[in-house]
Amino acid sequence: MRLPINEKGNNNEFIKFINKIDGDLRDSFENSIKKNLETIQMKVMLADFTVIETNTFDPNRVLNYFFNKEKEAKSLKSWKVVPVQSTKTDDLHRIFLQMNNEIERYYFYIYFGIQFHSLLFYKLDKNVININKKIRELEENNFNIKQEISKKGNQIIKQELDNLGYKEIGNTELFEELFTKQNLSEDLSEKASNLEDNYPQLRQNFQLLETLKKDLENLMIELYQINLASIDSNKLMIGEEGIAFNMDMEFIINKKTHQKTSVIDFEKIKKTEFIRIEQEFSSIIELFKKNT
C-alpha cells in the first residue's frame, strides 16, 4: 500500500498517524537533499555558437550525501539498507537509496532519490568555432571529390559496357544483365571504386576529420538539470526531473515465509504497534534532518 493513505471520509486514528510519519519523513528528506542541489550559473556555447547562461549542480555532492546517509542508516540495526545506486539511461540519471524494516506485523519500504538530465554544451572557447569551420571546409572538400569520383566512375562503367557490347541496350535489359551476371556487376563496381586510390587527399581528409571531431569532443562540457519539485513513482517512470520519495506499507502474513499483503485492517492495529512504529521512524526522520 502506497502512503499517504486517502483520509477522505475516514477518521481512523492510525491512518492519520501513519500519514503524518510519511509527511514528516518526506519533508525531512526533501529539505535535506535540497541543500545539496544548489545550482550555479555557467556561460556555455550552443552548436550554432550562441552563448547562453544556464544552471547546473554537482551530482558528486549528491552522491556523497547519499553515501553518508547510507552509512548513518546502517548504524540503525533494525533498518535494512540497499546500497546507494546511480543509473543512467541516455541523458536521464537517477541516484537513490532504499531502506526497509519489519516493525511488529508490518513491513515498510522507502525509496529516497533524485532524477535529473545531463545536457552537453560547448565550452566558451574560440577553438570551438575554428574547429567547426575546418570540419565544414573538409566535409565540403570531400563532397566535391566524391562528386568527381562518381562522375568519372560513371564514365568508366559506360565505357566498359560499350566495350562489352552493351552500347545500344536499353536500361531495363541492362539492369537484368547486371542482376543475372554477378561477376559483371562486381567487376564494374571494383573498377569504379578503385578510383578513390587516385585521390589520396580524400583519405587524408577523413583522418583529419576524425582528429578534429575528437578535439571538438574535448571542448564539450556536461551540465546537469533538475527540478526541485516532488515527483511520485509515475513521474519517475516517465522520466520527469525532481526529488522522489515513496513509502509502502504491507501487513506481514507469515514472518517465516515473508508472505505479505497490501490489505490492512487499520481497526485492528494495536496501540503498542503505534509506539514501535513511531520509535523506529523517529530515528530515520532525525537522520535526514541532519545537515550533510
Image: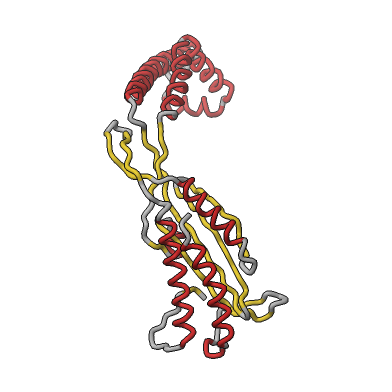
Q: Looking at this rendering, what residue extends furthest in the top direction?
A: 198
The residue positioned 63% from the left and 65% from the top of the image is: 80
Residue 156 to residue 217: above or below: above
Nearer to us in this view, 187 or 73: 73
Answer with left or right where residue 165 lies relative to residue 44: right
Nearer to us in this view, 88 or 280: 280
**Residue 230 position in % (x across, y down):** 39, 62
Nearer to us in this view, 262 or 107: 107
Q: By what rule are the colours in the image chosen?
A: secondary structure
Q: Is residue 147 in view? A: no
**Residue 5 position in % (x across, y down):** 45, 78
Q: Is residue 43 in view? A: yes
Nearer to us in this view, 165 or 34: 34
Q: Looking at this rendering, what residue extends furthest in the right direction?
A: 256
**Residue 270 position in % (x across, y down):** 57, 88
The residue positioned 42% from the left and 88% from the top of the image is: 10
The residue positioned 36% from the left and 17% from the top of the image is: 141
Counting every numbered tag in the picture gives: 0
**Residue 248 position in % (x across, y down):** 53, 72
The residue positioned 44% from the left and 12% from the top of the image is: 201
Answer with left or right where residue 48 lies relative to residue 120: left
Residue 178 to residue 108: above or below: above
Residue 208 to residue 239: above or below: above
